[in-house]
Amino acid sequence: VIDANRDGKNEILLLSKNDLYAYTLDAGQLKPVGEFHFPKALECLTIRALPRSAGKPWVVVNMIDDKGMPKSSILTLNGSQFAEEMRDIKYFLNVVKLPPDYMPVLIGQEGQPPRLFRPGVVNEMVKQGNTLIPGKGVALPKGANVLNFVYLPAGKDERDGEKIIVLSDNENLRTFTAKGARLAESP
């Protein structure tokens, strides 16, 4: 949910196997705003929104091709029309709030079939022309990937430092210190 076209009303963005839809909530009803159809050879996986101070928010869609390689796209919503700003991005992308300021940042990770992700390499992504390139690395604990973690800011107690929460392959939550030391895991 984000004001994707900057009209002052939030849009609800939904993703199907090959399509992206935008709706507004009007009198308790979802009203269609726009849609975008991706090639049938790609399978949509996730959708994220990246607010931007200048320009319309980016709608970030992760997809894979028939070989399991990432083919992500970044779109904007102009009125009721989606426009592809970048396509065939060879990284899985996510929007996370990174320390120290916890502002939304675009991060990426390469694919590596037969596994989904190339292990251990997550970077902040930098726009260069009409594409994205990897920037500064993001230090994450073992088992973390571009899509399965979140930073938890430090609490008011100085001893309660920043944490990294990771969803493991077996769907347990693992808690780590900011330096990657494992603290706990859910049953």
Image (spheres, rainbow, N blue to C red):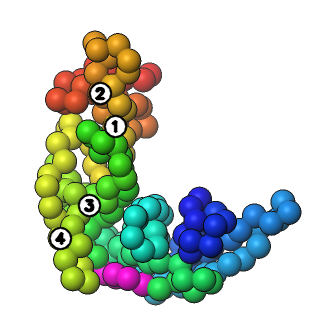
**Viewer-proximal residue, 169 or 183?**
183
- Name which of mark 4 and mark 2 comes first in the sequence: 4
Q: Position of residue 109 (x, y in %)?
A: 23, 60
Q: Circle 1 — which element?
A: strand
- Name which of mark 2 and mark 1 comes first in the sequence: 1
Residue at image position (28%, 12%) is 159
- Name which of mark 3 and mark 4 comes first in the sequence: 3
Question: What distance separates the C-alpha of mark 2 from that of mark 1?
Answer: 7 Å
**Viewer-proximal residue, 170 or 87?**
87
Looking at the rendered structure, which numbered label has been put on residue 71? none
Q: Which residue is mark 4?
A: 133
Q: Circle 2 — which element?
A: loop
Q: Which residue is mark 1?
A: 151
Residue at image position (30%, 71%) is 70
Question: What distance separates the C-alpha of mark 3 from that of mark 1?
Answer: 16 Å
Question: What distance separates the C-alpha of mark 2 from that of mark 3?
Answer: 22 Å
Q: Which residue is mark 3?
A: 108
Picture mark count? 4
Q: Position of residue 30 (x, y in %)?
A: 77, 67
Question: What distance separates the C-alpha of mark 4 from that of mark 1?
Answer: 23 Å
Quadrant (top left, top right, bottom left, bottom right) of the N terminus: bottom right
Type of amino acid at the residue the image marks with label 3? Gly
Q: Which residue is mark 2?
A: 162
**Tag in front: 3 or 1:** 1
Type of amino acid at the residue the image marks with label 4? Ile
Q: Are marks 3 and 1 in contact (CB under 8 Å)?
A: no
Residue 43 visible in rendering: no
Is 94 above or below relative to 132?
Answer: above
Q: Which residues are magenta?
A: 84-88
